[in-house]
Image (spheres, coloured by chain):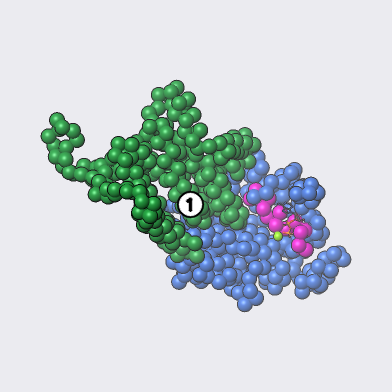
Amino acid sequence: MIKVKNAFKTFRTHDRREVKALVDFSVHIKKGEVVVFIGPSGSGKSTFLRCLNRLEEIDSGQIFINDVDIYGKKVNINKVREEIGMVFQLFNLFPHKTVMENVILAQQIVRKRRRSEAIEIAKDLLHKVNILEKESNYPSQLSGGQQQRVAIARALAMHPKIMMFDEATSALDPEMIGEVLDVMKKLAKEGMTMVVVTHEMGFAREVSDRVVFMDSGQIIEEGTAEHFFTNPIHDRTKLFLSQIL
Amino acid sequence: MTFNKRSLITLAVLAILVTAAYYFLIRRGITYIWHWEKVPEMLFYIGSKSADDPVVRLRMGVLMMGFVLTLKISVLATFFGIIIGTVVGIARLSKEPVTRGLSLAYVELIRNTPLLVQIFMIYFFVGSILRLSAFVAGTAGLSIFAGAYVGEIVRSGIQSIHKGQMEAARSLGMSYAQAMRYVILPQAFKRIIPPLAGQFISLIKDSSLVSVIALADLTFQGQQAVARSYYTFEIWFTVAFLYLIMTFSLSMATQFVERRLSISD
Ligand SMILES: Nc1ncnc2c1ncn2[C@@H]1O[C@H](COP(=O)(O)OP(=O)(O)O)[C@@H](O)[C@H]1O
Ligand SMILES: [Mg+2]
């Protein structure tokens, strides 16, 4: 479902330094797989996710989503993005719109659904993430955990084939992490293809098929969550795990 | 300080000035004979347009006609100023160097030359080529002038919106234009209401400059009325008061809108 081949991405900072965010990066994610990416800050995890829906552009290499080369000349990137839901660390709900409006906006203008149909879908999803009672509230009136659950519903409303989570629980107070992880676990168990950047190893152990450890824009080690708990091989992996566990 | 308070203070100052005018004229022994009773008919009167016009009804006096024209020009220039400004504000942030350069050139050109000169140039140069009336030239001049300032305000408003908003919108499959229209601009406009209101209040006042191309706005009618009647003080105080009504109403409307939009905060 997702095939990344030899992707390179280098940023130029304001003082003209070069930062290699992805170095000859290749990965393969199958339909229905839940893959967790871990790694120290600055290791290129967000860059990888953002290149998957072209919020950032790779410098070279290829990325296929459902066998479509998303960097191909004839590709309509908006069509590709409809199929890939993205959940951000800082939620990024639209603050001028109510919860309901947040969830129906893209359905109406991108998926071209009728308002009544969009509302029906939204209600189902808000119910699923357990926040239907806040449908007419504004994001500012919600806790972080509630906002993140709305953001997940908003992404799901497009009926994406893939969901990406970029440290979706990192900005939350500890007592709210669980409620968001629960929603993510539910999705994983329903068979959603998920690309998850997180340091929640409990989540990884419970639902992930694979864990990938990244550093300096490269994959250092990959295996099951169990592998990382019991016998990580590389020193960098061990050092990192000792910091987060 | 809010615009409302400011307008009230302006009103108080105006009242004090009228009182002071009376006082100093008396002190200096100048016998200025006040004719406030002549002012109402410059606003409204009942009568016919001319001697051979039999229709007698309520008609606008010269100052009221000027008021209406000033209002018309200001509303039109505000409308076009917002449209031009929105386009320019977005263009200023474009990835295209040509678009960015052109919009910057426009903004700099307009902001660094006097409005009076711009109005002359549009009326006498562009206007004579395209055969524009004084009304069209004046309105165009003010719109183009306002557009440059509004453009900078809009640009700053767009830049003040967290970039995660654009990314969230785009990641849902919205085009750049859709994201701007439904996500970025509504938030940006909400944030820039105060500077925009300030800009349009300035615009109402700046519109008095169109009187130089013989457009019969409030200032022009005031000048003419003074020249005809010599009720200098009464007329200019009335003119000032009429401008104040417009700017005051605008600031009231702005506050109303701002309160309405603050529910999502
Ligand atoms: N827009 C950018 N401009 C410059 N450097 C960037 C930009 N985005 C990311 N980087 C750099 O690329 C590297 C990888 O960043 P990122 O993918 O955000 O890492 P992670 O998500 O693993 O913390 C970091 O060194 C970061 O500073
Ligand atoms: Mg990151």
Q: Nearer the viewer, residue B263 or A111?
A: B263
Quadrant in which the C terminus of chain A is drawn: bottom right
> Subunit of mark 1?
B
Question: How many callouts does the rendering have?
Answer: 1
- Residue B220: % across, % down: 36, 38
- Residue B94: % across, % down: 60, 41
Magenta-highlighted residues: A39-54
- Picture residue at 59% right of the left edge, 73% below the top: A179
Kindly tell me whether residue B115 is visible in this rendering: yes
**In which image quadrant can residue A242 be found?**
bottom right
Q: Is residue B29 above or below residue B123?
A: below
**In which image quadrant can residue A133 be found?**
bottom left
- Picture residue at 52% right of the left edge, 67% below the top: A140
Q: Nearer the viewer, residue A205 or A145?
A: A145
> In the displayed structure, does residue A116 sit left or right of residue B117?
left
Q: Is residue B76 above or below residue A144?
A: above
- Residue B43: % across, % down: 26, 45
- Picture residue at 24% right of the left edge, 42% below the top: B60
Q: Nearer the viewer, residue A241 or B203?
A: B203
Residue linked to disc 1: B198
Q: Is residue B72 above or below residue A127?
A: above
Q: Amino acid at mark 1?
A: Gly
On whether residue A51 falls in the magenta region, the answer is yes
